[in-house]
Image (cartoon, helix red, strand yellow):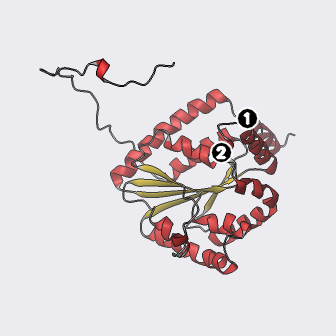
């Protein structure tokens, strides 16, 4: 008798069919637009956190989520290194400034969990700062949830061979080499340290009220579809009737004389 679990696992190692992926992504993106309309209509406040290994595919998922959406409703927050002034502030302060208002979705491409990950592993924070974060973070998130914010946290997991493969592709692709930062290069030698930091972080911040949802990101296409499908399932929504169902007839402007083409500066038509 065949081991069904092993067979399924073996099947999942095959790359997802591109045609199926495109069709399913298109269907899910239509649902994302419906979710966006619902969030706006109901005045919901949504935070989605994306964390995980370098090159695990967080950016690709975020790009597919935001592609069909209105940037005034769904925005991405990817904060850089804190300024000298921000380093003296309460740790969560600069993230609080980015929280959603009613009718908004905010996607954090890395978040306050930097303290439990890169800052801890690379020595950018003290032991006291690190342990204070682990103690205060659950309380901070409970406070957000009590205020009415919908908080969803994703951790993207990728094996070390696949991560190395993606690093090599970035190194040899002129359009992606910018994604390789000095921090990424240094993290290659600290795989175990990052694993330990992730386990410690989960032990403090993975709760029933604010759980971590782990995404198997070894296959980018599957990871994108699975994440979007799950996100849609986390926020009950209904399809709203479209606000515009037809376009009015264009009226001709009487007395309007168009500016001569020779008076305008056009982009050269190279193609």
Residue 233 position in % (x across, y down):
52, 49
For this rendering, which residue is in front, 262 or 150?
262
Residue 17 image-quadrant placement: top right
Q: Residue at x 76, y 53 (%)?
A: 185
Q: Is residue 206 visible?
A: no
| Residue at mark 2 | 178
Which residue is situated farthest in the right direction here? 1
For this rendering, which residue is in front, 35 or 183?
183
Q: Residue at x 57, y 49 (%)?
A: 230
Residue 98 position in % (x across, y down):
46, 61
In this picture, is 72 found above or below 129?
Answer: above
For this rendering, which residue is in front, 31 or 60?
60
- Residue at mark 1 to residue at mark 2: CA–CA distance: 26 Å
Residue 157 position in % (x across, y down):
71, 53
In which quadrant of the rendered image does the N terminus lie? top right
Number of the front mark, 1 or 2: 2
């Amino acid at each position: 008798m065949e081991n069904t679990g092993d067979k399924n696992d073996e099947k999942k190692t095959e790359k997802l069919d591109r045609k199926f992926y495109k069709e399913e992504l298109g269907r899910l993106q239509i649902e994302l637009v419906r979710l966006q309309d619902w969030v706006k209509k109901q005045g919901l406040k949504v935070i989605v956190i994306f964390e995980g290994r370098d090159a695990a595919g967080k950016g690709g998922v975020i790009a597919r989520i935001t592609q069909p959406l209105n940037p005034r409703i769904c925005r991405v927050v990817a904060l850089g290194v804190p300024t000298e002034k921000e380093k003296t502030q309460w740790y969560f302060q600069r993230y609080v400034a980015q929280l959603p208002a009613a009718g908004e979705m905010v996607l954090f491409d890395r978040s306050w969990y930097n303290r439990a990950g890169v800052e801890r592993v690379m020595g950018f924070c003290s032991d006291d700062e690190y342990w204070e974060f682990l103690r205060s973070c659950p309380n901070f998130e409970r406070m957000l949830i009590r205020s009415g914010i919908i908080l969803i946290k994703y951790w993207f997991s990728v094996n070390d061979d696949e991560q190395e493969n993606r690093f090599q592709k970035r190194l040899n692709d002129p359009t992606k080499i910018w994604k390789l930062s000095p921090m990424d290069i240094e993290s290659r030698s600290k795989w175990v340290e990052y694993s330990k930091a992730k386990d410690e972080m989960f032990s403090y911040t993975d709760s029933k009220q604010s759980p971590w949802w782990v995404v198997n990101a070894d296959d980018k296409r599957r990871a994108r579809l699975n994440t979007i499908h799950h996100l849609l399932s986390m926020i009950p929504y209904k399809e709203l009737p479209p606000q515009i169902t037809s376009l009015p007839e264009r009226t001709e402007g009487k007395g309007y004389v168009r500016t001569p083409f020779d008076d305008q500066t056009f982009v050269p038509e190279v193609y």
